[in-house]
Amino acid sequence: MDKNIGKKLDGRYEITELIGVGGMAEVYKGVDVIDNKTVAIKILKKEYAENEEFLRRFRNESKAIAVLSHPNIVRIYDVGFSEKIQYIVMEYIDGITLKEYIEEEKVLTWKDTVHFVIQILRALQHAHDKGIVHRDIKPQNIMMFTDGTIKVMDFGIAKFAREEGKTATDQAIGSVHYISPEQASGNVTDAKSDIYSVGAMMYEMLTGRKPFDSDNPVAIAVMHMHDIPERPRAINPDIPDGLEEIVLRAMEKAPEDRYQTTGDMINDIEAFKANPTMTFGYYQEEDDEQNKEDTINFAAPAAELADKAADAEPKSAAPVYAAAGAAGAAAGYAYGRAPQGGAVPPQRYQQAQPQGYYDEDDDDEYEEEERSSLVVPVLTAVVVVVIIVAVIFIATLLSGLLKNSGKKSDFTMDDFIGMDYNEAVSKYSNTIRFEVIDSEYAEYPENAIIWQSIEEGTEFNKGDTLKVKISKGMETTEVPNCLNMNQEMAKDQLKLRGLDWKIVQQSDPNVQKNYVIKTEPKEGTEVHKGSQVILYISMGANMDQVEVKNFVGMTAEDAAAVASYSGLKVKTEPKPAYEKEGIVVEQSIKKGEKVDEGTEIILYVSDGTDPDGEIPFKITFPSDARGRFVIDYIVQGKDGKRETYSSSNIIVPDYTDYEQIIPGSGENVLVTIKLTNLNNNSSATLGVYYFNFATGSIQVQSEDITGAFQTVGAFPEPETDPPTEEPWVDPTEYGPGTEDPTEPPTEATTPYVDPSWQPGVNGEYDSNGAWVPYEQGKNGDWMTNEDGSTTWHWYS
Amino acid sequence: MRYRYGTDIGLKREENQDAVRCEYYGHNVLAVVCDGMGGERAGKEASALAIEEFFQRFSAGYTESMGDEDIRKLLVSSVSAANSVIYTRARLDFKNFGMGTTCVAAFVNKHSAFIANVGDSRAYLITDKQLLKITTDHNVATLLFEQGKITEEEMEEHPQKHMLVRAVGVEKTVLTDTFILDYEDKISLLLCSDGLSGYCSDDEIYDVILNSDFDDVADELINLALSKGGRDNVTVAVISD
């Protein structure tokens, strides 16, 4: 009985049964008593709980899955890292592993294969997008539900792709059957390593065989590094051509030759699904090459390498399946063709002598332990490290041997680095086939060769392919915006673009000390990566004296430029003004004043709107008027909007006059003043005026105060008590700024007052321009018109 | 610290209105390039006066123990002194109407370069990668460019490219741009009049500097300007350590 069964972790997860044992952890089925659901609980084995490296990896897994959330990735619910026990609570999956499924089915149909692989790729795509590389993709890490849904699990050795640096154990762990060449050789792994493993799994699903097999995991790893697996269609001719191409491309030795992203691979699979008879033509070139004499051939070194391996390691890997039978050789793929000519049957690694440092603890056997669990089959660290060391050691040894492997060669490779590609092709096309595999930005001129796959001085055969990378020239970038950033931020901006900088300090009143005034070259300029940009950093203002100039009347832009040129700190503020929009109408420091450099000057700039103004308006009442009144001031703006201001109640004769301040804006605003008698609610127009809020002046269009009071019945005995004493309102009282006091009323030159013209003021201008007040009974009298209004008639 | 300088009338002008001088102050170097303007010998007189007055004022104010800010201020007041002298001279004689000069000055000590500038002569930093312009030209085209009203290409071709918005001796006072550039191991500066920078690209200038012996660098740069037609007086000063 397991000591853990029956335990409750954290008071929440009750452990019910052991469902699997992995290298460093045990996996239990359990119940989350709070949510009442079945969970899987992975508990780090006691013996490893004190090992830093294991702890790190165990926690790494939880860290990795915790950032993942995808229907095809096993979910993680909880983690517990206490001193006593380390566990991860995960989704419980009632299913089998893909490994078990393959064992049952032997060979999967291409439809099933595609169905599973797409799900795996989607899961990986999600992980890769989050910067996580799984690094241990193999069938035993893929769980399947009965409905065919796939879940990827065991991110135990997943790597955060952006983490820098490698540790020994980071290098070459993972199941050797699906291990990518770069992982096997201890090189840096990335998302493309997962793609290789998926390809290897696909290979197995479609053919029923692992791409490489041996009793010796080291031999397997070496084969992944150097050998070409047998062509899938040679094993299973039912595999469609297009799908085979996908597998081969995923399994390319060089990461740069593979699908670069899971997305690329998914696209091809989707395209294939849509049309299973299609082919991609990825290996067309090799077809052609097939006919040439000394086609470069990876199988050849592979076979030799295996021989050497056998020598190096007592009776190790036997001749690797060279020419994969007649079918393979006939097929148009360069693969699997060995010079020896296919005498050796494929998939035979006859040697079987276990290595001294290598136990019986074979990968497969080891996985057997886990049975139908979602468990993590992890090689024990010891084995892993041994394998790494062995693999790297052997690989190094072999590549050394390989170099001297005495094949008869025709030529010695020249140095092409720096040579123009076209020139190289025209000069050497007789002996070398050039293949451009990539182009990169480099210091070399555009199209120059910057990398060659065969080193200078190496012997090669006529017609061999030399892979080259060519230069795209110097990479350019734009100078980023650095203005008004502090020095450090600006440097970061430049660093991000791969630019270098020089700091120049400059005094500037407008930019805060230590902030960037400008750059040279300017923002947005296209420059070569690595080139230098001057950051002008403000030292703040000088303490020099500046004589302030006149800015009024200039455009805001010009004024600001001139002002800042002369060392002032400029602030502009919009202001309603009658000047054109954008013109400086006022400056906070007068022209000619001397101030310290860096002093702030405010430039008020017209915003084109009329400024608000207000004009006080005083009405003197006829002395004999009586009653309670309200006066309304109706202001009609430019846009036709009316604004009415009303007086408070005015009791006459308690008030002898009334002044109202009228707000408004504009130069020619019509204001109508209306009198209302509150006793009888009758109203009359008292006057009509044009207000100029810009100057504060008023132009009278018409006015009859007495008449208005009369109309509203404000005189108890109008006949017997005419308003002789009534003070007339001097039009000049409205302000000396009245546009043209002689103009209104224009009709005043004639003694006759036109009734159609709103009857008069309390006097009129005579023909000489002199003001003559109405003096009832003396120089004229009021006559009532037919409409009830009154008109002044002069005595002749 | 070493320097080389030279000036040439060019191929088209009848008079060289440029002036240049470099001097040691201990181990430190002061270099000044002026490009005069105004007819009837006024331009030539302006640039000569400016250099004379500048050095006089600087020498009078300079001490070994000056701090950075003091050096910067001394450069500014030296420009101001030149300004006053030319402004006064111009007012004395109507023939000197419009008399003025550009002035770019660099003082380099063992940790910093101090640069003062009025007008459209230039100071460049010569790095191991390229030529970097330090100063801003005070002409109409540059002003319009900085305001974003014209593009860089339009600025190069602008009819008012040579019309200065700031110069020494034209107004009663002058505003001087100053720059301080700290350096660690090495520094190289180029001062020049627009007879060089106006007709040769930065890359061309940089190429010549890279491919010349230091002793010949001033002559080679002048030759470059002449090879471009020599339409203006050309003056250069190179400081390097």
Image (cartoon, coloured by chain):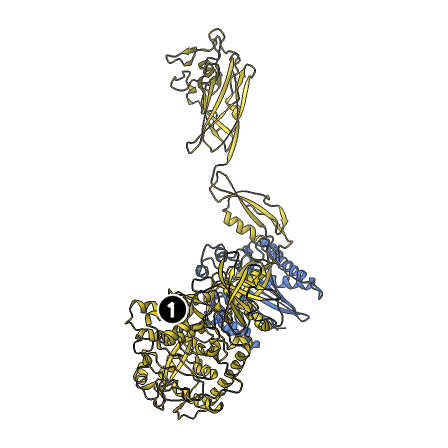
A475 vs A572: above or below:
below
Res. A268 visible in picture: no
Instruction: Locate residue A433: give its quadrant.
Output: bottom left
10 Å neighbourhood of mark 1: few (<14), some, or many (≥20)?
many
**Number of callouts:** 1
Question: Which residue is painted at 58% across and 73% down in the image?
Answer: A48
| Image position of A329 (left or right of A751) | left
Tell me where residue A743 appears, x and y as whole percent: 45, 25
Quadrant (top left/top right/bottom left/bottom right) for the C terminus of chain B: bottom right
Q: Residue furthest top?
A: A720
Quick one: SS at disc 1? Answer: helix
Instruction: Locate residue B96: give its quadrant.
Output: bottom right
Chain A is shown in which shade? yellow
Question: Which residue is painted at 45% across and 58% down in the image?
Answer: B151
- Using the image, name the chain to which the residue with label 1 belongs: A
User: Viewer-proximal residue, A259 or A489?
Assistant: A259
Question: Which residue is painted at 52% across and 30% down in the image?
Answer: A614
Tell me where residue A342 appears, x and y as whole percent: 34, 89
User: Viewer-proximal residue, A179 or A251?
Assistant: A179
User: Viewer-proximal residue, A15 or A510?
Assistant: A15
Q: Residue furthest front?
A: A1
Chain B is shown in which shade? blue
A112 vs A758: above or below:
below
Instruction: Locate residue A517: give its quadrant.
Output: bottom right
User: Which residue is tagged 1?
Assistant: A116
Res. B91 visible in picture: yes
Tell me where residue A473 appears, x and y as whole percent: 44, 73
User: Viewer-proximal residue, A416 or A386?
Assistant: A386
Tell me where residue A427 appears, x and y as whole percent: 36, 84
Dot 1 amino acid type: Phe
A688 vs A389: above or below:
above
Quadrant (top left/top right/bottom left/bottom right) for the N terminus of chain B: bottom right
